[in-house]
Image: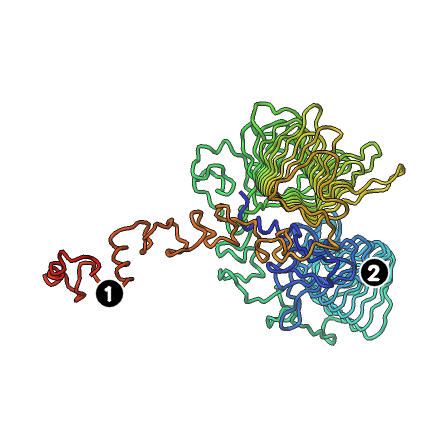
Amino acid sequence: MMTPRLYAVALALAGLNMSLAAAEDTITVCSSGCDFTSINEAIQAANEGDTITIAAGNYYEGVPVDPNGKAVHLLGAINECGGPAVYIDGVGTHKGIACTSGETTETLFENLVIRNGYGFVSNGAGVMIDASSPRFVNCMFFNNAAKPGYGGGGASITNSASPVFERCIFSGNRADAGGAVSVNYSSSPTFDTCTFVNNVTTNGNSCGVSILNGGSTLISGCTLSGNSGPGGQCNAISSGGSVPTITNTIVCDNNVSGDYTDGGGNCFDACSTCIPSYGDMDCDGVTDDLDTCTYGDAVDSDVDGTPDCEDLCPGDPDKIEYGVCGCGIPDIDTDLDGVLDCNDFCPDDPSCFEYQITVCRDGCDFTSINAAIDFANDGDVIALSFEHYFEGETIDFDRKGVTLRGTVDANGNPATILDGLNQHAVLRVTGDLLDGHSIRLENLIIQNGYSDGWAGGLTVWEADVSAITNCIFRSNNSIESAGAAQIEDSSPEITDCIFRYNTSSIVSPSNQAAGAGAITFRGSKSSLNRCVFTMNKTGAIYGGGGAIRSTAYGSVNPELDIVDCTFADNEATRGGAIWVSKGGVVLNRCSITKNRALGAFTPSGQIPAYGAAIYVDDYYPTFVQLTSCNVWCNLFGQSVMGPGTWVNDDSCIVLTNTCSDTCGTDSDLDGVADDLDLCPDENDRVDTDQDGTPDCLDGCPYNQDKTDPGVCGCGPQPYVEGDRDCDGDYDAEDARLAMAEFGIIEAGACPADLNGDGVVDGQDLAVVLGAWGLPCDG
């Protein structure tokens, strides 16, 4: 089940910031309370010339930060010494930044630490710059590592790229060639007042900056020292087929190899006369040449004796490495069956071990998911660890009904990544399953899938996939099919899932109607609950569905039941969020905002931009019903349009407008304009106790039996009339409290102490006898 925190994160990822980027010069990013929590989401919303200010902290994007060619200024916060206080972390699974879309120096990165990047199938681990020329100011590239056989640990600069680096530090990076930077293929970078220290070449002599194959690199006012290779000494600057210009630069205890133009003011020696001076970028009292951390060495958040900069689990006092189960989850084996609890289907029962197969990098049954499936029997659970899996080929279930279960982090979010590396589709299920079991997918991040015929992320064809739960589909792409998932003649329940940045690119003239940005359903009778679809896109000309496309499969018509889902910033020719043809789709309590239907021009004429939110076709009988939905601020044309049948009840808010005129402000980012919102400062779709009253109107949002604290507050007990001590009943103690309240007795007195002298005795009985027979009114 999606945790409240994950759902809140998902809503933030949906980009429901109705203060339009087009009208703003500055977009803010922070962990909470800003326009966005994700740097990439902010870039997606930005316009040329915008500034994206990023608050201090760690940012784990899951994919490289990519400006996509936009001239934007990514401005990070600084510490008290002026060093960068924003950390873009690749967590050893992906590059930190990618500039491959022709960026110019108008794309500016300032005050950022790019760390723990990893390059898998190309050069560059910290940043990859290909045919682009961005600018970096006051940035640090720290502890990035290129894959063996590749170059450019801190940065790879290639294909006539001309980036500029000013006051940057490259420290602790590793690669086979160009431990800090590799420059290749007629590229001409500029390094101005930069420091290269403690970088390592793992296979050769080029430990600092490697410059090859043309171009005119400029190195001015820089310091290169303390870099190393397998034999100790190495070349801080090495060139071949290129002649860099070096000016006012210190190379200390490192070598310079190859041709170069001496611009004057240089000092190259073994640190006898060339004495470099170093700053303290992270302001921790340790100079950068001696600093093993990118921020304060003394910071130890979990007080485990290991500073955060060397602790892969800085919030877990019991771990300094991920281990098998990840941070926050102990690597223990309660039933001593050889399978850690986080991977054990029955952690307290060693006898059920045979029904679960484990896959991880080390210490499990298999290291390959496909190998585990080949070995598995129907009904088995294949348990994956807190890891990034690169199978190298599509994971094929081979007609076996198994559960593929990932690991969750301490907050219940999926933590197991299946990566197609933009080379192949990630998952495929085809054909009837062998022994009657169904396939289940749980707790998975499915990313970077690619296919030129199947869906990029998941294809299901005439097979029984019963459930897809707590999964994230991101950055998958397909040509001729759906970006994230194509589901044909199968009816899974999809619950607590996120779909974002998935794309369908249609190139075949004969297939212009195929492929939604996220999911295409054909003949499916599926339910979707608490899912988020954001920034998905399809290029289909005659079809559509930026997020979902639903149509028939043979004679089987689809039936979709969509509840509590969010659709935002999706894009298509028709049906910015959803395109429906044949069958029925019912949406209940959904938010459909900021989706776009763009239309298209073809040789035969213009395709109108119908259905900014939903397009309902009528070529075959088609029915769409909306109940308690918000359809708001969708672009171009009517929000819901098409000749087919659609209805909505009185609880819906359906506006057919464009964001340029009447959308107004949405302060709480819940997809409802303030002037229509019951709670304009708080998301009125959040109902924690599920009592039908949103938290913003509920005085007791965690007590299903109360919406008002009343006398007894919001405790677990329902209110009982007269219950003044709030113990859940009405008894003598409540009567005593009532008597004290009305002055009949003193507060705290015994009910039988009628004369209030603190003792129950004969004098109290005399009071009763003296009043015997008198009327109560006096």
Give the label on residue 746, or none.
1
Residue in the foreground of this view, choosing between 206 and 446: 446
Q: For label 2, count other residues whose C-alpha is less than 10 Å away and answer few (under 14), some (14-19) or many (20+).
A: many
Element at label 2:
loop
**Number of marks:** 2
Residue 238 shown left or right of residue 287 in the figure = right
The tag earlier along the polypeptide, 2 or 1, is 2
Q: As shown in the figure, which amino acid type bears the numbered disc 1?
A: Glu
Residue 752 shown left or right of residue 703 in the figure = left
Residue 167 appearing in the image: yes
> Residue 567 at what x, y percent from top left?
66, 45
> How far apart in space, not on screen, are marks 2 and 1 (Cα)?
86 Å
Element at label 1:
loop
Residue 423 appearing in the image: no
* Residue on which the image places disc 2: 162
Q: Residue at x 54, y 58 (%)?
A: 314
Quarter of the image holding residue 752? bottom left
In this view, 319 is above or below 571: below
Q: Residue at x 72, y 65 (%)?
A: 110
Quarter of the image holding residue 242? bottom right
Residue in the foreground of this view, choosing between 303 and 762: 762
Residue in the foreground of this view, choosing between 506 and 699: 699
> Residue 63 at what x, y percent from top left?
68, 50
**Quadrant housing the C terminus:** bottom left
> Residue 236 at what x, y percent from top left?
76, 63
Q: As shown in the figure, which amino acid type bears the numbered disc 2?
A: Ser
